Structures are given as C-alpha cells and as structure tokens.
Image (cartoon, rainbow, N blue to C red):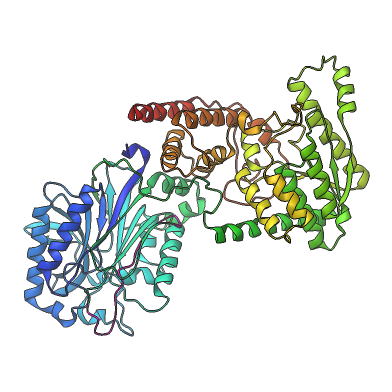
C-alpha cells in the first residue's frame, strides 16, 4: 500500500555492534542490519561514521594492514548486496592520494556509486582528526579508482533518485553539522531533500539535547529530512563515551529518536514525506532565492526499490492543530489567547475605540471571543463593562444555552442585555411573504438580524463589533453570508474548532474550583455544537452541527494537510485510515464514514470560497489561515472535480484492500 505515488520514502539509521579495529566483527554486524533493513522495506540506510573500523582507533588508522582490510571488507559488502539492497551510506577510512580520508561510501545493489570525504576536521579539546585525516577540501581528484572502476569522489556529490523525482540525497560527516554554513545547507539549496549525517559524537552533559535542537532546526531551515546517526558503546572509553544517538527529523518535526547507550544493534525507521518537503520549497520564495547561489554539484543518479510495507512508520496525529502533550498543549493555549488579546488590543488602540459589542450564544466560539474580549479590557486597563454582550434568543435557542450565556456574562462582569429577536424575525418573514416553514430563509433571517442588531449597537455605543466564527467554520462555509459571516473584527478566525475546545478548557482550569465562571465554562464544553436556528424538541437541541457538516475532528484533520501542505485528498484519506486503524480519533469511524465526510468537506470548501473572499480582518494565529489578504487566494468558481476524483481513487483502493 505504501507505494511511491504517496510520496513516502522509508529511511533507516543503523547502529551496529562495534569493536574498535575488529573489522570482521563490525562487518558481520553491518551485514545483519542491512538484511534486517531490507526485510523492513528500508529504501535508504545510513550507518555511523567510521562504522567499519570504529572512530577511536587513533594512530592505528594509518596502518596499512587495517586500510587493506577495509578495502577487502568493502568488496565483501558489494558482493553481499549485489542481489539487492537499500541505498547504503557507510562510514569507513579510505587511503586516496597518499592521504587518509574519513569517508561515507554510497552503495546500491553491489555498486559503489560515490565516496564523500569529511569536510571539517575537529582539532580541539578531545578531538585530533587532522592528526590522521585529510579534509575533503584538500582533495585534488574527482574520481578514484577502486576495483578497476572510476568512482566519483568529493564533497560536491549529490545522489538523485530517478524513480522518486522529488528525492535527492546529500551526505556529510559529524563535525560538518556543527559549523556555520554547513555542507548540508549548500546541498539542500542545490536540491537535496534527504540529508544524512554519519557521526561518532561523544557524550557530555547537555550534548544530546543540543544535537536534537540542531538537527530539528537544520531540517526546518533547509526544508528537508535529516537523518543523524552516531556510534555507540564499543568505541574506546579511554577518554570519551559514545551513546549512539539517532535522530530522524523532517522540516523541523521529530519523526523518530533512539535512546542513548543501547547494547544491542539498533535499527530506526521512519517514512519521510518527500511531497511535503517539495511543497514547502515551492511556496518559499526566500528558499528559491537562496537556491540561486547553489552551484558546482555533481549529480549521481540511482534508483531505490518501491516500498512494499503496509504500515506507516511516522508519527500519526488525529488532531494536528492540538499538541498531544498536555504540557505543550497548555503552553499553546496560553500563547494563542495572548496573541488574540494582543491583536484585539492593537485593533482597538489603532481605531481609538474603547468599547466592544459581542453576541453571546452560550456556544463555544462566542464564549472564547467573550473571554478574549474581557482579558483585552483587563490588558488595556479599561473596565470590563466596556464589553457590551448581548444574548439574542430566537426560534431555536434552548434554555441551556441562554442560561449559560447569561450566567457567564454576569460572572465576568460585562455589560449584558437579553433581546428576544423572535418578534422581529416573524415580522421580516411576513414582509417576505414567507409561510414560516423551517427552511433556509427561516434560519438565515435570524442570523442576519442578529448581525444587523449588533452592528447597530456598535454604532450606537461607538464600539467595535466582534465576530466569533472559527477557522473550521470558515473552511466549510458554516456561516450565514452577511450574517455571522461578517463583523468589524473576527478574533477567532484562524483558530480551528478542535482547538477552541481546549482553549476554553484551559481558561476554565485557570479559574478557582467551584467558581461561577468555571462551572459555566465546563457546562458550555459539554453542550452539543449547534447554530440553534431550528426550534428545539422539548429543550433538546435538534440541530446538531456535526450531524450536518461532519465531526469537527475530521474536518480539522482534513483541513490541516490540505492547506498547510497542499496534500492530495487520496493521501489525506490514506492517513485518516491509518489513524482510524490505530484508534487515535475520539470516535470510532468506518472507512465509509471517513470517505463520506471528506467528500462533504471538499464539496463545501470549494462551494464557499465566495464567503472567504470578503471575510473580515482577523489575526493569523497558526500556520493555516484562509485570509484572502495574506494566505489563501482562490477563485469562487473553482471546481472540485479532480480533487474528488483523487479521493475516489484512494477510497476504492482502500475498500478493495479491506475486502
């Protein structure tokens, strides 16, 4: 199922068992890991620096007996992998031009494709590399003869994967990562999307954290995947200890990491999304500008095997907008609300306005907007009574939501008024010659009158009218055009619905136990999501948003990769099915349900661009925004046909597999 049309490449980082200078022992461990990697569908496999001999062999690296043994062991590896292997990146010393180079040999199916020497040789504190090795910058040759074959040699080699056109491999060794203007930076600008570092990096306090920070940061700066692998126990402990840290990162995201100080051989796998990396490079004008400076690289072409595996080896997030870690989630909530407050405070200050008008329904979105409004007044030093909150019960308002709206406004100390809009709405329906049947006109009369009322109150009070709709509603067009669709400022406009819940929960947790605000917020969190435009059935809310537009967790799951990475619908459905199979969603869904709601999502998204084109201002909070001024431009007449076709094709593939 994991074929190249999904854009994934499975990379592996192997840490073999090691004995310094015991080349036969090391070779056996390396071959075992190659065999294991092949069984697991690994397409590109990297080993640590000097993994064939050990890094801490000191002056013994200069001995002819060892260098000849390395050459013979390389021949064994070529012979053992001739019938098939991942693309191998193997660390070893090689004698070339009467110098010794610390190199990475690149091998595929028994062929030596190229040799990359280490560029930067550490010569400080515990490191003495220049005592034994020459830098790749000192080499005068572009080809070296091994086994009567000329092999590309140098720091200027990149490896293009012909059958994965978006994939190109760049390789550096240990210290190369630790310097400004590292080799991998130039490699990425020249097109390398898969970067590998072969290391023998010793452990001191705090170094593992710093390595992780560097690898994540560099993968993000270079818009690339970065595989880092270091040698472990088995290196000499005369003066140092080696922990075997392995990190696989993708565009700033940690995919996999290996614990330090493992005694047994280790193989770490991760599926890298090459399409995501290519998308970010396409849309980053700054990256393209910097790439103009990259030149002088030689390209070696090769191929990798297609991936036969069925299970995706990478983190799967059911709620991509919401951090899974509770600590990070709390930090994110605090950061988001602080940004909303800062944005609203600046809007008020710039407009020289000190009052806000807001409609409060007792639902999630208006609750979050009200909390932000109150905290903004606190931040500016204005009284909370400068927030003028109105609850506007109509045909579908339930006692529960009206009660929560009233209690919350009074507990927060804002100015509050209840205005029943049913009489006015009936008058408008009468003027329209409407029979009162419960259709779209019946619903939208309420939404548009509420908006008109709030705008008029804002004029009366010299206030700014605050919108409450969230990002998920913006994507699906779940708002009434010229109704709740507009406002003076949409403070929640880039906050998705799944995150709105956590923001309110976080705000509730900040309140004292048993306080009126806390109790009210917790009840609002338990209330079904509804626009409440149709009459309730004996106070039971009958119009439930998630029964009409689908579960909001699915809408947000579809939305994030669709906008953030331009991901094809079929691939998103594949990921949703992987998440479903692992039971990571809040509910249990069938494949048919995923397909049905995603089809609905795409249809609604395309049909409602006209609402986004004229949406009000609002602060961008995260990496996904649909503002027509800053992030998302799309013609209202765009047709969803080819996206629906892609979705259908994947659905059929998954359905056949299920059968």
Is residue 245 found inside the magenta-colored segment of the image?
Answer: yes
Left or right: where does residue 4 sit relative to residue 603? left
> Which one is in front, 226 or 28?
28
Q: Is residue 633 above or below residue 110?
A: above
> Which one is in front, 584 or 11?
584
* Outermost right residue: 460
Region of the chain picked out in magenta, as a range = 236-253
Instruction: For residue 177, say whether it is visible.
Output: yes
* Quadrant position of residue 484: top right
Q: Is residue 577 above or below residue 651?
A: below
Look at 74% across and 32% down and name the residue there.
532
Is residue 348 found inside the magenta-colored segment of the image?
Answer: no
| Main SS class of the magenta portion in the image | loop
Instruction: Residue 593: give x, y in percent of width and height.
Output: 49, 30
Look at 65% across and 59% down and name the residue there.
334
Instruction: Residue 574: give x, y in percent of width and height.
Output: 41, 37
Q: Quadrant of the N terminus?
A: top left
> Which one is in front, 311 or 524?
524
Instruction: Residue 369: give x, y in percent of width and height.
Output: 74, 48
Left or right: where does residue 346 sit relative to residue 595? right
Look at 10% across and 78% down and name the residue there.
63
Q: Is residue 495 above or below residue 262?
A: above
Q: Quadrant of the C terminus?
A: top left
């Amino acid at each position: 199922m994991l074929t190249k049309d999904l854009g994934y490449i499975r990379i592996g980082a192997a840490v073999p068992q090691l004995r310094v200078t015991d080349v036969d022992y090391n070779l056996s461990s390396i071959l075992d890991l190659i065999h294991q990697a092949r069984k697991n569908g690994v397409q590109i496999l990297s080993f640590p620096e000097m993994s064939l001999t050990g890094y801490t062999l000191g002056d013994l690296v200069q001995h002819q007996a060892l260098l000849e043994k390395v050459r013979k062991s390389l021949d064994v590896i070529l012979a053992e992998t001739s019938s098939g292997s991942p693309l191998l990146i193997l660390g070893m010393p090689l004698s070339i031009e009467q110098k010794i180079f610390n190199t990475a040999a690149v091998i595929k199916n028994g062929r030596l494709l190229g040799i990359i020497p280490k560029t930067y040789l550490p010569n400080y504190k515990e490191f003495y590399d220049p005592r034994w090795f020459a830098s790749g910058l000192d080499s005068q040759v572009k080809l070296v003869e091994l086994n009567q074959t000329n092999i590309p040699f140098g720091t200027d080699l990149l490896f293009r994967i012909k059958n994965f056109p978006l994939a190109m491999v760049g390789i550096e060794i240990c210290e190369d990562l630790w310097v400004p203007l590292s080799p991998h930076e130039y490699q990425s600008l020249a097109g390398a999307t898969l970067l590998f570092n072969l290391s023998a990096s010793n452990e001191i306090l705090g170094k593992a954290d710093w390595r992780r920070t560097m690898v994540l940061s560099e993968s993000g700066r270079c818009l690339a995947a970065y595989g880092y692998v270091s040698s472990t126990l088995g290196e000499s402990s005369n003066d140092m200890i080696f922990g075997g840290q392995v990190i696989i990162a993708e565009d700033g995201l940690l995919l996999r990491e290996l614990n330090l100080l493992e005694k047994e051989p280790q193989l770490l796998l991760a599926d890298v999304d090459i399409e995501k990396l290519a998308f970010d490079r396409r849309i980053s004008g700054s990256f393209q500008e910097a790439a103009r400076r990259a030149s002088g690289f030689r390209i070696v072409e090769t191929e990798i095997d297609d991936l036969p595996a069925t299970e995706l080896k990478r983190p799967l997030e059911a709620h991509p907008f919401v951090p899974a870690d509770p600590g990070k989630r709390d930090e994110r909530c605090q950061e988001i609300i602080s940004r909303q407050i800062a944005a609203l405070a600046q809007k008020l200050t710039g407009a020289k306005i000190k009052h806000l008008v807001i409609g409060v329904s007792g639902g999630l979105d208006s609750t979050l907007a009200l909390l932000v409004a109150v905290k903004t007044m606190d931040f500016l030093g204005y009284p909370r009574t400068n927030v003028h909150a109105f609850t506007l019960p109509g045909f579908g308002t339930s006692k529960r939501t009206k009660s929560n709206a009233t209690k919350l406004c009074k507990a927060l100390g804002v100015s509050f008024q209840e205005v029943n809009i049913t009489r006015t709405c009936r008058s408008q329906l009468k003027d329209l010659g409407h029979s009162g049947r419960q259709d779209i006109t019946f619903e939208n009369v309420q939404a548009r009158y509420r908006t008109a009322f709030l705008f008029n109150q804002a004029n009366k009070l010299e206030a700014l009218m605050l919108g409450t709709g969230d990002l998920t509603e913006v994507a699906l067009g779940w708002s009434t055009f010229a109704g709740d669709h507009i406002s003076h400022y949409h403070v929640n406009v880039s906050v998705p619905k799944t995150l709105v819940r956590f923001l309110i929960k976080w705000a509730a947790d900040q309140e004292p136990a048993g306080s009126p605000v806390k109790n009210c917020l917790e009840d609002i969190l338990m209330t079904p999501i509804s626009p409440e435009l149709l009459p309730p059935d004996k106070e039971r809310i009958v119009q439930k948003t998630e029964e009409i537009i689908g579960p909001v967790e699915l809408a947000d799951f579809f939305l994030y990769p669709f906008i953030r990475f331009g991901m094809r619908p079929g691939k998103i459905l594949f990921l949703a099915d992987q998440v479903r199979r692992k039971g990571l969603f809040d509910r249990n869904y069938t494949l048919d349900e995923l397909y049905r709601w995603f089809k609905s999502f795409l249809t609604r998204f395309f049909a409602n661009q006209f609402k986004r084109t004229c949406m009000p201002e609002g602060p961008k909070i995260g990496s996904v925004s649909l503002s027509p001024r800053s992030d998302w431009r799309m013609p209202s007449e765009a047709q969803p046909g080819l996206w629906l076709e892609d979705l259908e094709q994947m659905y059929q593939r998954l359905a056949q597999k299920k059968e």
